[in-house]
Image: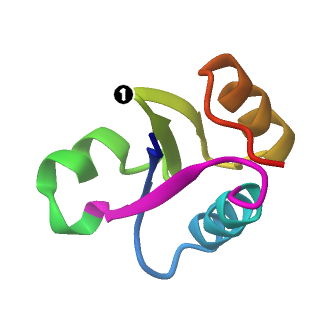
Amino acid sequence: MKKTVKLYSRPRCHLCETAREVLEDLQQQWNFTIEEINIDLDDQLVEKYGIMIPVVELDGEELQYGIVNKKFISEAFTRKNLEFIS
């Protein structure tokens, strides 16, 4: 079953764009979809993540926030038993 990785972000956020590129790159090795959530559309999310974005979440666990590192996320996917496809 394909898992969903949530990316909490907002428009015009350079770090968010970089995080999305890292996740898109990782999709070539791991079986998951990306759900990007614009925190600016939800006051509760702005309060929760305002200065932390981008935030990468899998199965309700925040894997990393701020500067997203490909190697770190890949290791987190291994730990979370995400399906490896290549």
Residue 73 on image: x %, y %: 72, 38
Q: Residue at x 86, y 39 (%)?
A: 71
| Mark 1 closeness class: few <14, some 14–19, many ≥20 residues within 10 Å | few
Which residue is tagged 1? 60
Q: Residue furthest top?
A: 79
Kindly tell me whether residue 4 is visible in this rendering: yes
Residue 84 on image: x %, y %: 73, 39
Kindly tell me whether residue 54 is visible in this rendering: no
Is 57 rendered above or below residue 27?
A: above
Residue 14 on image: x %, y %: 63, 73
Q: Secondary structure at mark 1?
A: loop
Q: Residue furthest left?
A: 43
Residue 57 on image: x %, y %: 47, 38
Q: Residue at x 29, y 60 (%)?
A: 39
Q: Residue at x 36, y 51 (%)?
A: 50
Magenta span of residues: 27-39
